[in-house]
Amino acid sequence: MTESQTKTYTIEGLNCPDCAARIQGAVGQMDEIQACTVDPLAGTITVHLATPEIPLAKMARIVDQTGHRLLVEQPGPAHAHGEHDHGAHDDVRHHHGSSEPLDVSQPGRPGGAVAGFIRFVLSRRETTLTAVAALLTLLGLGVAWANLYLEVRVLGISGIVLFAGAILVGGLPLARYAFQELWYSKRVGINVLMVIAVSGAALIGEWAEGAIVVVLFSLGEALEGYATERARRTLTGLLSLAPPTALKLLADGTTSEVPVQELALGDRVRIRAGDRVSVDGLVRAGSSAVDQSPITGESVPVTKVTGDTVYAGTINASGALEVEVTHLAADSTLSRMIHLVQQAQAQRAPIQRFIDRFARIYTPAVAVLAATIALVPPLLFQQPFWGDKGWLMRALQMLVIACPCALVISTPVSVVSALANAASHGVLIKGGRSLDVLSRVRVFAFDKTGTLTEGRPVVTDMIDVCTCGSCGESCGLIHASALEAQSAHPLARAVVQAAENARIMVPQAENVIELPGRGIEGTVNGAHVTVASHVHFDEQIEHPPDVCELANRLSAQGKTPILVRHDDEVCALFGLADVSRANSKAVLGALHEDAGIRTVMLTGDHPSVAAEIGRQIGIDEVRAGLLPEDKMAAITQLGEQHGLVAMVGDGINDAPALARADVGIAMGGAGTDQAMETADVVLMGDDLSQLPFILRLSRRTKSTITANVVFALVTKAAILGLAAAGLATLWMAIAADVGTSLAVILNGMRMRNVRPRR
């Protein structure tokens, strides 16, 4: 199957697993479709085509029959091969409900959630029918109350008519969905159970209970859909961070506001102060502080100058910038980031896969048990069959209780909320499996260079040893920086940076000669200057014993000593080292103390250098001098000794070890395609402080899922016991089911509120 034969589309209003199963069964029966997969969390359908032509109109009609709407979207530039279609919606619309986007915002405003739910209900045909059924049921209950307590002789049949009307109005969608479950999905789903239960209630004259079941079940489904929509919008709302238009710079120097989709690679756009950055690109003119928190999670704005990279969706805080487009709109870091998380939603956690399998067996099993309960006692033990205490009513109650909604939704809503929360803080977690494994990790292995350290050498020590009496202050730094300014070596750049920090005027050097692997020499202000390693001085240049001792002391501290000589006088020693990140020690301490994590450094660096860095940051174990294959072996050994292992690296140099670890965590993923595509977890910013956050988020999610599953099972067991004993009512069963579903949804959505500790 080629890539061009796979298409992904959005389905509006898709929120529940049962709806997804109906659509998947219906579309899967089309001759033009080899296979299809419907993801209720992402709200998408992926079809594998058996023919070159895409049967969009036919597929849209089938989706419409299930009560939803297929949104056909134009292919974006980043998906020219047809794997996914993203962009502006076409008008393949046969649904008669509202086509307006749902307003699920403002969760924190008093009454905002209630108002949002009311708008949600009234925006759909099926849920509007539920509202009408609820009104009829309330009127029917009012009539019944008046007859019973006020002795108002309302026509006796009127209450039954109102309840029957509620069952008819609210039950029509249920009946249609039940037929689709049996016809398309070939399974006994929750809608089938509800139709049987309501029909049975009407058959034995329990019209009020039947109407209440219809209304409560439909409202529960609507609440589930509303909550799922809100969880989904937490993620997709990030897309609105990137402005839809950009100020394109024209050849005459003026600007024109154009849609970002019309920009080409190499175009230049102007980003004014206070604007959101519209594209991924390189700064070509100007400087400014940019808030990158939507992408990288950084809490402090980052200064951007010519040559720096900016990302769509970030905020330009101060000066104007001229930016050259390096990525098309559909291929921006923000778009790819959201697309990857949407893909990750389909990667289910182990407990979620178990619950799905369990529900497929559990529901029909309870249906068989209910039939047994309805028939066996009356047939074999002369127990009553009819009436509100008869065994038929108990069986109907069990059918209602059999609804697996709370179980099925308990895991995905928690996972989606956690993934969306992490993405909004600049962390990509590749699905429920990665989240689950991360919660059980006991060892964090770290690369050293660029992960625990800054990844670049700096001058840590400057020791003046000149005795000639003719040199001024900082003569060693002046001489060294003059030569090193003409070298591209990392150590040379560190010396030049030290001179800049000291505000030293660097003189011009002449006759500069590189000493490969040793250093550099030349003429500075008429003096012959050599800047080289201690090894070179030991072998080629005589120097005092006390200078040699100082150099050895620097080496023992894990630093690289560099000696400077002008003419015949050694004038200075420099110690250079790749220093630890400012927050490395705090992060490792938090992992160890708050989460009980063992930390290990895996590095190819010299043991003395690694040991010194390890001592500074307080890491538990240091393994140095390792080749890539040695790091992989170390990951395996750590797993055997301590359990699941997470490996933290840059996503490129440590790819084998990242792949071998149970969870591979790549740092600095913004703009790094390889890290975003291959790692299990990507820290978009170059920030170790996200590690305690994602570990806490994963563990909180796991405990929440466990609590949801236990709560759902215990509640169902309790109501089943009451039903078997004849102590439950039909409306009590459905109220317990709806209440349980709502409770696990709200509990799962709390994962959106977990925040990094600053």
Image (cartoon, helix red, strand yellow):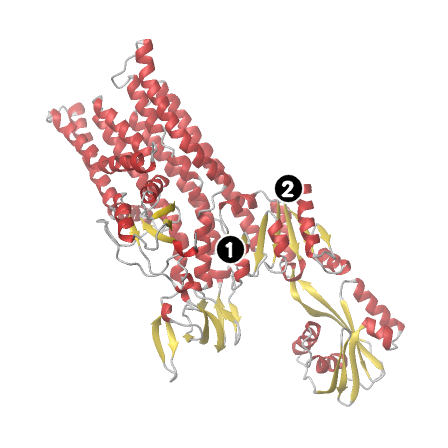
Task: Please give the name of the residue rendered at 24% of the width and 49% of the height, measured from the top-left corner.
Answer: 95
- Three-letter code for the amino acid on which mark 2 is drawn: Gly
User: Label 1, on which residue?
Assistant: 427
- Three-letter code for the amino acid on which mark 1 is drawn: Val
**Left or right of residue 67: residue 149:** left
Query: Is residue 587 something one can see in this rendering?
Result: no
- Looking at marks 1 and 2 on the same chain, the residue that comes earlier in the sequence is marked by 1
Residue 539 image offset from top left, x and y in percent: 86, 74
Q: Quadrant of the C terminus?
A: bottom right
- Relative to residue 513, is residue 71 depicted above or below? above
Residue 342 image offset from top left, x and y in percent: 43, 52
Of the pair 530 and 26, the residue shown nearer to us: 26
Say what secondary structure mark 2 lies in: loop
Picture quadrant where residue 571 is located: bottom right
Q: Farthest front residue?
A: 51
Disc assigned to residue 656:
none
- Relative to residue 243, is residue 207 depicted above or below? above
Task: Please give the name of the residue rendered at 41% of the width and 72% of the height, measured from the top-left corner.
Answer: 264
**Left or right of residue 72: residue 408:** right
Residue 104 image offset from top left, x and y in percent: 33, 51
Q: Nearer the viewer, mark 1 or mark 2?
A: 2
Say what secondary structure mark 1 lies in: strand
Residue 152 image offset from top left, x and y in percent: 12, 25
- Relative to residue 744, is residue 523 depicted above or below? below
User: Label 2, on which residue?
Assistant: 643
